[in-house]
Amino acid sequence: MLVICDNSALSALAEMELIDLLPRIVGPVVIPAAIAREAAHPAAPAALRNWIAQPPAWLTVHPDPTHLLNETAALGAGEAAAITLAWQNREASSLIMDEKRGRAVAKSLGLPVTGLLAILVSAARSGLVDFEDALLRLQASGFRLSSVLIEQARLKATRR
């Protein structure tokens, strides 16, 4: 399975100092080069820039697709590249993406999509993190979540 990640999850996890959860929950991760450029951009959070400067062995930076899907035209470069890469590998890929527009495009293409909150729920259920602590760290990073999503995630994180 090719797990392709968008920038927002990487950024939040880096700021939360929990980025090493990602391979423990989903295995190796692939990002298109556009996401790596976003992560290294001077405007990106310092934690993310430092992390991408020395990427871990579990991360593969894949060349950007040469032709982006027309459906991704209104999205940012990283989202468009991630969705196109997932589409090109649609028989054996999943996508980690949290932005509403990007998720909507991915879902309209029939791509499996998950988000950061689901990863944190899995980590909590596996005993890797305290969900409430991770949630506080996530919110402190500036990641926006609706109260409905938070409550649904709390229920899932505590369900045995």
Image: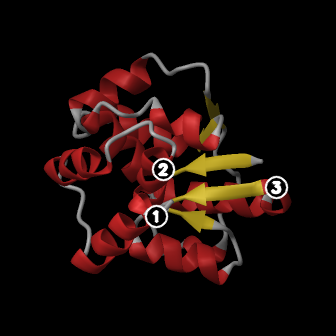
Relative to the observer, which residue lies in front, 124 or 35? 124
Q: Is residue 32 visible?
A: no
Q: Could you tell me how far apart the alpha carbons at marks 3 and 2 are, in whole angstroms?
A: 25 Å
In this rendering, the answer to whether 99 lies above or below 34 is below
Could you tell me which secondary element the residue under label 2 belongs to?
helix
Residue 128, by quadrant, is top left
Q: Could you tell me how far apart the alpha carbons at marks 1 and 2 are, in whole angstroms?
A: 8 Å
Amino acid identity at mark 3: Ala
Residue found at the far right of this picture: 91
| Mark earlier in primary sequence (1, 2) | 2
Q: Residues within 10 Å of mark 3 (few under 14, many from 20)?
A: few
Residue 118 point in image, percent of width and height? 47, 59
| Mark earlier in primary sequence (3, 2) | 3
Which residue was labeled with disc 2? 125
Which residue was labeled with disc 1? 159
Amino acid identity at mark 1: Arg
Side of 158 where 46 appears, left or right: left
